[in-house]
Amino acid sequence: LQDRLRRPGTGMLDRLRRAQAADGRVDAEDLARAAGEFGWPVAAVTGSATYYADFAEGRRGRRHVRVCEGTSCFVSSRGEHIARLERALGVRLGERAADGSVSLQGVRCLGYCYDSPAVLDGELPASGETLGGLFGDPLAAQRRTRPGWVEPLKMRAADIPYVSAVDRPVVLAGLVGGEEPWAVWPSVVATGSPEKVISEVAASGLRGRGGAGFPVAKKWSMTAGEPAPRYVVGNGDEGDPGSYGDRLLMERDPHRILEGLALAGFAVGARHGLILVRSEYPTAAERLRAAVVEAREAGHLGERVHGSPVDFDVEIVVGAGSYVAGEETALLHALAGLRAAVRARPPYPTSHGFLGHPTAVNNVETLAAVPWIVRHGGAAYARLGHPDEPGTKLVCLSQRFRRPGVYEVEFGVPLRHLVEELGGGLREPYRLRAVQVGGPLGGFLTPNQLDLPLLSEPLAEAGAALGHASLVAVDSTVPGVAILRHAWAFGAAESCGACTPCRVGTRRGLELVERIREPAQAAAALADHHPLLEVLDVASLCAFGRGVSCAVRSLLRVYSDELHHTAPTSKGGE
Ligand code: SF4
């Protein structure tokens, strides 16, 4: 595998995409040709082509529509939007019309969780009008009262509300307040030192914002201590259903991410940076690519940046549909064009990363915070938030809230403040039944648990997770068994398959939910969950299997009464 990784291959996913664009599919001839061009075994190319959802879904139609199966969209219609779309387009999910006119792909998720249910028609968010009024009655009515369905494309970063838990007028990551990107980079390359950049980031207490929470300065120091060549990677594979802050950052503020990546590259001594953007975010990829061109023209990127001895450039790589590609070892495989499978650690990417070389991988929100820290000092950043978790976090609220959106808040703010003050509670006529915190690998909390602070440890102790800090409101019209099935279905669909407990366990979990639907079998099926969840907890190779277990455990707790005493007899959604 290492041999294959060392061969150039970052263009493989684009190569397969071009083949698919020609006639809607990647066939055996395409695989052989791509393998020859890249010097890969055909089996390795076949592995990629059959792994990623974008290629494995089958032949595409001339019009390709992607519909969101994420949690917010599921809650908003319990899957009904998919059935309507199938009827309106005359094609089943995952299939192509016989005349080749249209194909329909299910995606978890499209990152429009504030405006569920979401559809991408080609590369544009679709409205009821452009899809021929397919969202008839309640959904279309909802849309008409919310003309902002395509409005997010016009949204500026400055429109993202900034809220301070302690009323400090401080702007982090420059989201509000108009701090221009690339403000510190020229002076850093002229007179700064990598040690100084790392020491400011260390003083800030900045931890990874993608979910794992690893100290950023420590990761950079470890990478800088390894032999060159070294790489820095921006993780723009925001796959968590419920999260869309990274998408807005990449679309609205791409230069800030690039400046953060450049500072990371300077700190670790890397000449090359890469950002992996998921294919479900075509506008984000387009704007990042445009920003790279602009940054080169302005002299921020390229050889001898601003006349200094520093060389640094960035490549934008588009993924091909895999949730697990957000895990850093899987992401490195995706950058190389291989299957985005997780590998065991150690060795860590800081010593064996992209093409086998030392690599620092950071989430794009993490990178966006770096320019502010370098400009204002780590100590200023560390004064924000909570002593255990300094700084701020983008928090995403889903469509069921009265005021869905992305809010930048300081760590430590109570969840109740997010739900009731910022979100305004649920829109009429819905009543809050549960809040999913931290995405599909996080957990569900009851309304009584909302006094918990937005901090990793208290959330973990309560059976949830900070994750990427999304809050999806689940209202009381959604049956517990339906949301439980949704959680297992996500696990079964997105498991990378590298380890048996997760690959098989998530499918067994889905089978158990089907048994819960039969009243006579419900009690036994619920009891059978526990040994299965234990196996996922102790034997999963990566956090995915443990996260699915965490989510399911929390659902069994939150919906305990309902699942035990009112086992439904209908399909109950999805
Ligand atoms: Fe892959 Fe799941 Fe195993 Fe992680 S736990 S390596 S996602 S199969």
Image (cartoon, helix red, strand yellow):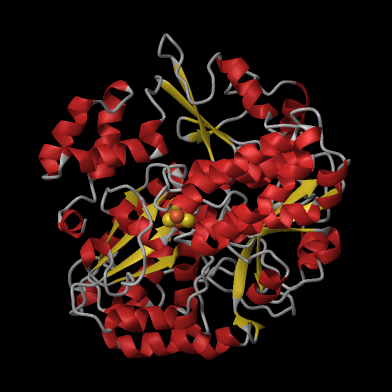
Is residue 23 visible in this depiction of the protein?
yes
Coordinates of residue 383 in the picture (x, y in percent): 62, 87
Coordinates of residue 352 in the picture (x, y in percent): 26, 70
Q: Nearer the viewer, residue 438 or 177?
A: 438
Coordinates of residue 94 in the picture (x, y in percent): 48, 26
Q: Is residue 448 left or right of residue 308?
A: right
Looking at the picture, does residue 234 appear above or below residue 103? Answer: below
Looking at the picture, does residue 311 appear above or below residue 278? Answer: below
Q: Is residue 459 left or right of residue 261?
A: right
Is residue 192 visible in this depiction of the protein?
no
The quadrant in which residue 21 appears is top left
Coordinates of residue 218 in the picture (x, y in percent): 41, 83
Looking at the picture, does residue 231 appear above or below residue 477? Answer: below
The quadrant in which residue 308 appears is bottom left
| Count of numbered marks | 0
Residue at x 36%, y 64% (from the top left corner) = 344
Looking at the picture, does residue 91 appear above or below residue 255? Answer: above
Residue at x 82%, y 56% (from the top left corner) = 424
Q: Quadrant of the N terminus?
A: bottom left
Q: Nearer the viewer, residue 154 or 486?
A: 486
Q: Quadrant of the C terminus?
A: top right
Residue at x 73%, y 47% (from the top left corner) = 526
Give ligand 1's quarter of the image.
bottom left
Residue at x 74%, y 43% (from the top left corner) = 524
Q: Nearer the viewer, residue 432 or 530?
A: 530
Residue lying farthest top?
Answer: 99
